[in-house]
Amino acid sequence: MFLLEELRPLAGPGVPAAASGVRLVEDLGRIAGQPPGSVLVLTGAAARQAAGYRLDVALRDAAAAGAVALVLTAESAAALEALEAAVDRSAAALAERGGVALLAADGDLAELVVAIDRAVAGDAAEALVRTARAAEAVAGAGGVPERIAEAAGAALGRPVRAEGGTFTARTGGPAGTHFDRAAGIVLRLAALAAAAGPSDELPGRSRAQLLTELLVAPENQAQELAPRARALGLPIDDWHVVLRLEPAKDPAKTPDAAADGPADGGQERYALLETAASRAVRAARELGGAAWNAALAGDALIVVRSQRRDQGRAGLREAVRDAARLLDRVRPAGAELRCGVSTAHQGLLGLRTSASEARTALRRSTLPLATYDLAGLDRMLEEWYASDAAQHAVRELLQPILDLGGERAAHLLAILRAYLDHNGSPARAAEELHLHRNAVSRNVRRIETLLQADLADPRQRLALQLACRAASSR
C-alpha cells in the first residue's frame, strides 16, 4: 500500500489497496490493458482529457483492469485545483464503487513516479520515513486510541484498527518486508501512547501557555521562544489557520477584557472562555486531519489548526467547516460565541498573521462565523485602495454619508454594506444587523436620496459595494 504527501485524494478509497507497480499512461484508451494492481499515472493530454464522461470511462476501465489508483497530473497548483473541481458526483461514485483511488498531483512528473515506485516497492528508506512520520503523528494524537489509529494509518498508508488497547494493521503483502517491520514499530508505539492516556494535563497546559506568549509577545521575544515551542511539540513551522472565539459582546453588561485578563464585570466573560477552552481541547481531537492547539489570549479563545502543507482554497473551505463544527461543540449552554477564521500562513510569523486576520474577521462582521478572506477579495481591495485614485473615488461616492460623521455615518454605511452584500434583501440585511426590516428599508431609501444613487442599477450597486468594503478596510 502507499500514501504520499505529494498526492491529493479526490475520490475513492481513502487509502489505496496493495499495488504491484506504477505505469505511465499517455492515452486514455490504454487504461483497460494495464496490469492488475497498477498505479496509473495519467500524463500530459491524457490528464487534461480526463474530465466529464471521459473521466467516468477512465475510472470504469481502471476498475475493470484491477488498478488500485488513477493519478491525474498537472503542471501547476492552479491546474491541480481545476482538476479537483472537475470531479463530479458520478466520478466519485464510480471511484468508490470500483475501489480505485482517484488522486491528483502537480510538480515534477519524474520525481512523482520515482516516489510512487519507491512507496510501492517498500524500500528501507521509504519505510524509515514513514516510521518517523507515523511516530510523530501518534505522539500528537492526544492519547485517544481512535485518533492514534487514524494518525498511524494515514502515515503508514495502511488501515490501522484499535481494539481494547491493541493496534493491528493489514500488511498488504508478504511478511518480513521493510514496511512490515516499520508497521510493527509504529503499532507498539501506538499501544504505549494509548496506555499513557489523554495528554491534556500538564504538557497540554504548558503548550497553551507558550502559545499565548507566542501570540502576544513582541516579535523578537516570540522568535526566542520558538525552540522551546518545538521542544513541547507545537508545530509552529507548519501552515496555520487560526480560529478566534469570543463571547458575543453585550456593551450594557460585559466590558472589554484587558490584555492580561478581565477585570470586574469581565470575570464572567473570562470564565466562559475557560469553559470553551476545555471543551475545545476535547472537540478538536475528534475533528482529525490537522494538529490542533488552543490557548486563552486576552478576551478570546485562540484555536490553531496546523497542517504540514498549504491546502489552498480547498483547505480553507475545510477549515471553515471545521470552525462551524468546533463552534457548535464548544459553545457552553446558554452562551453565544462568535468565531473568526483566518487564511493560512506558514511559520511563527505566519501564525501571528493568522491570529491578526481572525481578529479582523470578527471586527468586520456581525455574523456568528466570520471568515477573513476566503475569496481573496480583502487583499485585492487593500491593494486597490492604496492608490490615490481609488481613495478619491471612494470618498466621492460616499461623501454625503461621511459628512454626517461619527456613529450616524457608520450606522448608514453598515446598513448599505449589509443590504448590498445580501443582494438587496432588507430581510437578510436586517437579520445580520439585528434591526427590523422596515428600519433597513427606510434607511436604504434615505441613503439613495443622500447619494443620489439608483441601487437598482447594477453598475452603481457594484461601485457602492466596493466603496463600502474599501472604507471598512481602512
Image (cartoon, helix red, strand yellow):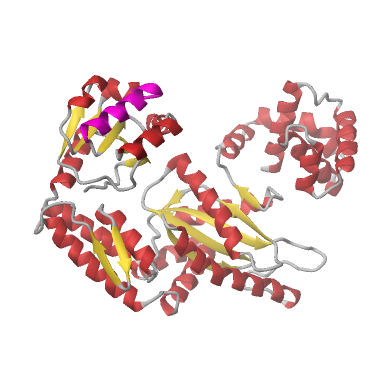
Q: Nearer the viewer, residue 303 or 285?
A: 285
**Residue 298 left/right relative to 225:** right
- Image location (x, y in percent) of residue 318: 49, 47
Above-or-below relation of 150 to 14: below
- Image location (x, y in percent) of residue 186: 23, 65
**Residue 108 left/right relative to 255:** left
Q: Nearer the viewer, residue 383 or 39?
A: 39
- Image location (x, y in percent) of residue 333: 67, 68
Magenta-colored stretch includes residue 52: yes
Indicate the quadrant where residue 40 lies. top left
Q: Residue furthest left?
A: 176
Indicate the quadrant where residue 145 lies. bottom left
**Residue 265 left/right relative to 451:** left
The magenta stretch is 50-66
Above-or-below relation of 171 to 18: below
Total residue callouts: 0
Is residue 220 in view? no
Residue drawn 45% across the image and 33% down it: 89
Residue drawn 40% across the image and 46% down it: 310
Secondary structure mainly formed by the magenta segment: helix
Above-or-below relation of 93 to 248: above
Q: Nearer the viewer, residue 14 or 373?
A: 14
Quadrant (top left, top right, bottom left, bottom right) of the C terminus = top right
Magenta-colored stretch includes residue 49: no
- Image location (x, y in percent) of residue 196: 34, 78
Q: Nearer the viewer, residue 118 or 419?
A: 118
Residue drawn 90% across the image and 37% down it: 442
